[in-house]
Image (cartoon, rainbow, N blue to C red):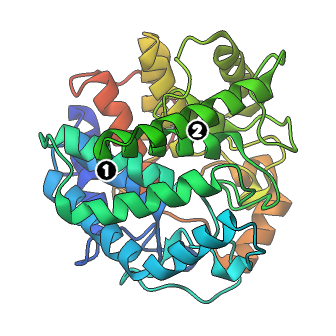
Amino acid sequence: MPLGQARASGDLERVSTKAILQCQSPGGAFVASPDFPQYRYCWLRDGSFAAYALDRAGEHQSSSAYHGWVDCVIGRMANLIDRAVEKRRANKVIDPGDLPPARFALDGSLLDDDWPNFQIDGYGTWLWSLREHLQLSGLTDLPSSRRDAVERAARFLATFAFDPCFDVWEMSGTAVHTSTLASVYAGLTAASAMLGDRGLAARAEEVRASVLASAGSAVRFKKSSVSGETDASTLWLASPFRLVESRDPVFLATVSAVERDLFFEGGLRRFPGDTYFGGGAWPVLTASLGWHYASVGDRPRALACQSWIEARFSADGELGEQFGGELRDRPMYDQWANHWGPPARQLVWSHAMYLVLRAELGSSSTPAATAGTE
């Protein structure tokens, strides 16, 4: 179906579903971007959101294949994860190279490069996504074949819950990040439910209490243990990770700060100081904001977010990582483009979050009028 016809009929859901499926390897992994060489890997975070989006779209078999791939990956790393847990519990020094990564080759093998790869949120997001998969696909119990991987990932999360790591943007590796803690909470909560382990639920509540305590009397949730900067990833505290309710006053103040500081050309940027490809607006984050609006019943603004994303689909049905960086900060856009080439034209995570927003609004939603070019 031509893109214009798909847009008019509201059938961009099929375009995005097909795009995600085409980016799934035979083994079940999702390549983050097929056209951007630096992203030709599978991140646990991106892949887990993609699997969740496919479950929302009814593509349970493909989602199951991804979770099977993660199961195999964690099995390969069993000794690495177990040694890291043992060392942490014994208060021994752990070399960064001995910590389990969150980015892998599509065949599941570990990568030997200097790219930041210790991101705890990937494991929390996977456990959350797996539980959602079971529920959305009508499975009542965790398959026995998945139990070892879930136990190992949960044990890792419970042990390293409060350790500094790189954030979702692969920055600030010496800080503890609020959105990472939210994913840890969601992952431990999910694992507790799947395994029937009350100890994991208690650990999840410790994480939640820490996040709430760190906010203290502050007006909003901060980015990390070392930064009070506004960061769009804090939107995930409510949807999907449910560490707080969508109408929690401190969270609503956080959303207000995100709106005030990060809107650009109708979409949402990552954080105020972002210079990556000029620091444009991301479909992933615009969809996340739309998800919040939908959760509190603000349908017009949720539809506006949906429409902004739909206007960014290319004529070939691609949906990129970010838009407008060349307008906001041309020198930094050019610097990154000269270094790595143009930004990703096709990002699986962008399609995934668009599908989630569409599902939250209902497939029959009528796109709101919006400016934008294909």
* Residue extending furthest toward the bottom: 112
Could you say which is closer to the camera, residue 348 or residue 304? 348
Task: In the rendered view, tell whether residue 347 sits above or below residue 14.
Answer: below
In screen coordinates, is 136 left or right of 253? left
Q: Which of the pair 318/199 is nearer the observer?
A: 199
Provide the residue designation for mark 2: 182
Give the CA distance from mark 1 to mark 2: 16 Å
Q: Which residue is drawn at 55% across and 86% down?
A: 111
Identify the residue at image location x=43%, y=63%: 152
On the image, the x and y values in percent for residue 195 come to 31, 47
Taking the image as drawn, is residue 47 in sight? yes
Q: Quadrant of residue 319?
A: bottom left
Q: Measuring 68% from the left and 48% from the top, which residue is drawn there? A: 280
Q: Dividing the picture into quarters, in which one does residue 318 lie?
A: bottom left
* Any part of residue 314 in sight: no
**Helix, strand or loop at disc 2?**
helix
Mark 1 vs 2, N-terminal side? 1
How packed is label 1: few (under 14 Cα within 10 Å), some, or many (20 or more)? many
Q: Which amino acid does label 1 sit on?
A: Leu
Q: Quadrant of residue 77?
A: bottom left
Q: Residue furthest front?
A: 90
Residue 140 percent across, percent down from the top left: 14, 40
Q: Mark 1 points at which residue?
A: 130
As drawn, 132 above or below 148: above
The amino acid beneath tag 2 is Ala
